[in-house]
Image (spheres, coloured by chain):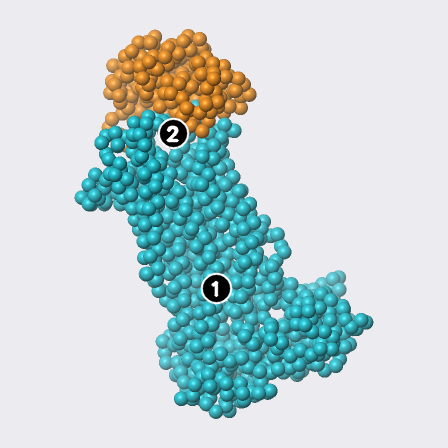
Amino acid sequence: MRLLFAGLVWRPARTHPLRMFLSFAGVAIGVGAVCAIHRANRSVTDSFREGVEAVSGAARLTVEGVDGVPESAGSRLRWIWGVGAFAPVVDRFAVCGDGTDEPVEILGVDVTAEEPVRRYRLAAPAGGDLRSLFSADAVLAPASFARRHRVSVGSEMPIFVRGRRADVRIAGVLEPVGPARASGGQVLVTGLRHAQKLFGMPGRVDRLDVTFPESVPEEEIARRIAASLPAGLSVRRPAARAASADKMVRAYRLNLAALGSIALLVGAFLIYNTLSMSVLRRWPEIGAVRALGASRRSILACFLAEGAALGAIGTAAGLGLGWALSRALLPTVGATVVSVYRATATLSVSSSWEPFVTAALVGLVSSVAASVVPAVEASRIPPAATMRPGSIERRRRRRAGWFAAIAAGCAALGAGLSRLPAVGGFPLFGFAAVGCAIAALAWGAPAAIIVIERASRRPLHRLFGVPGRLAAAFFGGNLSRNAVAIAALALALGMSGAMAVMIASLRRTVITWVDQSVASDLFVKSATGDRRGIIGTIPAEAVDFLRSVPGVAVADPFRTIDAHDARGTPFTIGAGDFGTAVRIGALPLESGRDPAEVFGRARREGQVFVSEPFARRFGKKRGDRVRVPTPSGPREFPIADVYPDYSNDRGTVVIDRPLFVSLFHDTDVSTVAIRAAPGVSPEALRDRILAGAGGRFAFSILTNRTLRAEVRKIFDRTFAVTWALEAIALLVAGLGVVNALFALIVERRRELALLRVLGTSRRQLRRSIAIEAGLIGAGALGLAALAGTAFAAILIGVINPQSFGWSIRVEIPWREIAAGFALALTTTVAASLVPARIAVGGDAAAGIREE
Amino acid sequence: MGVEIAFEEVSKTYPGARDTPALDRVSLEIAAGEFVAVAGPSGCGKSTLLHLAGGIDVATSGRVVVGGRDLTAIPEEELTLFRRRRVGTVFQFFNLIPALSVRENVELPLALDGNREASARARELLARVGLAEKGDAFPYELSGGQMQRVALARALSARPELLLADEPTGNLDSLSGAAVLDLLASLHEEHGGTVLMATHSEEAARRAGRVVRLKDGRVA
């Protein structure tokens, strides 16, 4: 076994260090990508969980409502004092007004009820305790917050909250325990009344945190609490809150993970490529050792060991790469999470080893899996093969029909799988269909070569004479080697082409949607400084103020609330003024009906609208009924229509504002879209609003132009990760193909020497090799076009709608794709020139003597 | 030491050549220890006959009985062991493993069986074929005649009962070819195994104890 491994694997591998390096570099990059993405994802999940744990303290259950909990609900839970305790909490976000524009979690607590639930330790003032919060504007800040914002006990700090500026006074500094660890230390603890006043919610809190000893059964308490509560309130574990937050970004996380897997797939394909080439090159030696008595199993073990060794080295390097990449990736992922999903998220790098262990396992398993096919193929080489040179090509040619049938089967299976629905919101079968398309590509390559060879034989002869004829013969004669090279190049090109189509299509779709939906001139939200996203609400009187500003033609308020269904699946409740839609129009609806008429009827009949992602995620359509949680319990509404929405992949149910206010008793709004009167410049109107707001309101106002630019910026940043991963994977795949081409030509030295002995000139041979490389490139481009179309169709038609619920209008970036294909073809031909010079140079007689 | 070989109505047709069998109902008996040359023009079925005797290939019909065992009826695993322990093969194109040294090539058949004496045996055989000093060299450093002598040493390393030589001089100049044939004959005398040599050279065929002539897949 040792000699077999040395003779068939180890020593030949040492003579091709570049090829080996490329293979394990492919795995390293794949593992690195998987590890980095997994770690970034884990950081998001851990941050949400730790944030919830920090503010939940010893709470085992929480009582919540869709728009908070009336304080009066506490009176129904007094019985809990018999077994445990509960504490009311206001838990919302504001924005620091000290110029940092950082979000800050405001935790409003009932000082007298806190002790059983949360622990605080004051670092300053000495001997201080929670009672310092009894004064009206007092807050406690973690030590890290105090350092970051340069505040100390007694100093005042401005914050933007609910469209206003408020000054809070630092009454104490907290050690980093308990709630002081929430939001990465970006938290201020204050008294309940103060928080209620800041957020305009007198008599209401966000939740009641309930604690009781471990010995008391949780289910029983939960059941008793649920029975005591009025309609509209529910009881759940604190962890469920983190789970809901995590579910918001689930599709994004899963798709990032899938992208990382594609990078790994390319890496694994490189291992397959390298091993297949090894098997093909060592075909006679394998036949010889089989004739000498080597068993199939030992040959199989040799090549599996080669795959495992390449995988192990690649994985080890990949883990280091993943560690470094994850540090670079987290800010980008964090920025996307903040701008697209949760404006208040604070992320820190996860310290868990789990992403490394998972990536290592995935790397090793996929490397060994990639080596199974070539290893089995090697083990099946008959001992007699070695006596009949060229028999492998004959076998392959004979089997090409079968391979084509298998390719067709894989393609058909992929087509079938792509029609299946998502599994738990994840497009599992979509990714399986991509796998089938790759398998079809690998199996279909030999047949493609035969077709191209037959079709090109005559034209090439006519065009280039003998070199053309030789090129076609070389091309078809090296069926097995060329098939592997073509499949690898086609996979890399097809995948990048499909990515380019997907991103261009999504970008065009989103920009068109923004152009259609962002018709207003200004967008007003509670002040967030330069920070993106919406943090907090603005009061109804601010809307009245905006309407009163001269030059404002329409002020259209919109409110959003995070909600979740009975299974904890998050979605958004939106409240917009249907009357405005009737007056000035709205987005085109899925049904294509006149929006003014549909909105008018919806207002009259109490109907709601759902976004396209909501419709897909919850399986709803026009005319269905949708269940929405309200403070007075769940209510069902008929769906008037479905509208496109690319701003939120959780899905949104939009209720008419008057109906919302009557159900939720909440008049705050999240944003106000403003249309300027004719002749009024948006910039001038913005300045007028800000001047008029003076000390009363604190707004952030975006113009139509800046909002659109912002959307493009967010889009491009979100997909920068995709591009980076694709580019790295492509680079390695491209180098692998160039390397394979090099090997293909140099190995044929003896054949080429023979042709020279027979009278073929060096120039003719070099030309024939260049033409053959052109055929390889052209074959790869043809297959890449087919595979790329399949990949793009699956990405756009299956994976995206199932992950995000978005419909995408196809946009093909012809120029980029043509440039990419031309570059690939040129590189392939250029890559053949140097080895061709080496192969046809030197002494022909020596060449044919070579063993 | 040698084994008896019996071909009973053996035919072999390669895939893709349905109408032209490489061997057509061949019946032949070879006694233990016999040195038989299988002669005939190219394509007459010589190599196929050797491959069937050595368990390297399987007959399409008929029986190939070697040492009392029908090779057409034993499973692949046993055939592998049969080739490893009882057959030595010399190929026309040497088929040395280029990545292994000369000595390692010779060790290989015994090493496959985990035999600890592989190295000593390889040294002994290399000395016997006159290449003791070339043990650490690699195949590409040898001449054609030297490579074939290494192949011969490798074929004998597991002390096989049956030695197959498929055109052993086909790729050598006459001087090297004669030296290899001399060596083959003397090794046969020393080891006493059955030798089956395919050749299209009359001169080579004359070195054998018996010559079987094939024409168009049949015994002439």
Residue drawn at x 49%, y 18% is B122
Residue A452, placed above or below residue A593:
above
* Residue positioned most to the front: A842
Residue drawn at x 51%, y 77% is A574
Q: Residues within 10 Å of mark 1 (few under 14, many from 20)?
A: some
Sequence-wise, the earlier of marks 1 and 2 is 2
Residue drawn at x 61%, y 62% is A348
Report whether A185 appears left or right of A329.
right
Residue A823, placed above or below residue A184:
above
Q: Depth check: A422 or A178 in front?
A: A178
The residue to which callout 1 is attached is A718
Under mark 2, the amino acid is Pro
Under mark 1, the amino acid is Thr
Task: Calculate the distance from the C-alpha at mark 1 to the C-alpha at mark 2.
Answer: 51 Å
Q: Depth check: A836 or A561 in front?
A: A836
* Residue positioned most to the left: A462
Report whether A702 appears left or right of A323.
left
Report whether mark 1 lies on the same chain as mark 2.
Answer: yes
Q: Depth check: A849 or B3 in front?
A: A849
Res A629 → quadrant: bottom right
**Chain coloured cyan in this rendering:** A
Q: Circle 2 sits in a helix, a strand or a loop, which is it?
A: helix
Q: Circle 1 sits in a helix, a strand or a loop, which is it?
A: helix
Report whether A176 appears left or right of B17.
right
Report whether A419 appears left or right of A191.
left
**Chain coloured orange in this rendering:** B
The residue to which callout 2 is attached is A284
Residue A717: image location, x then y, percent: 48, 65
Q: Residues within 10 Å of mark 2 (few under 14, many from 20)?
A: many
Residue A623: image location, x then y, percent: 43, 75
Q: What is the chain identity of the residue bearing mark 2?
A: A
Q: What is the chain identity of the residue bearing mark 1?
A: A
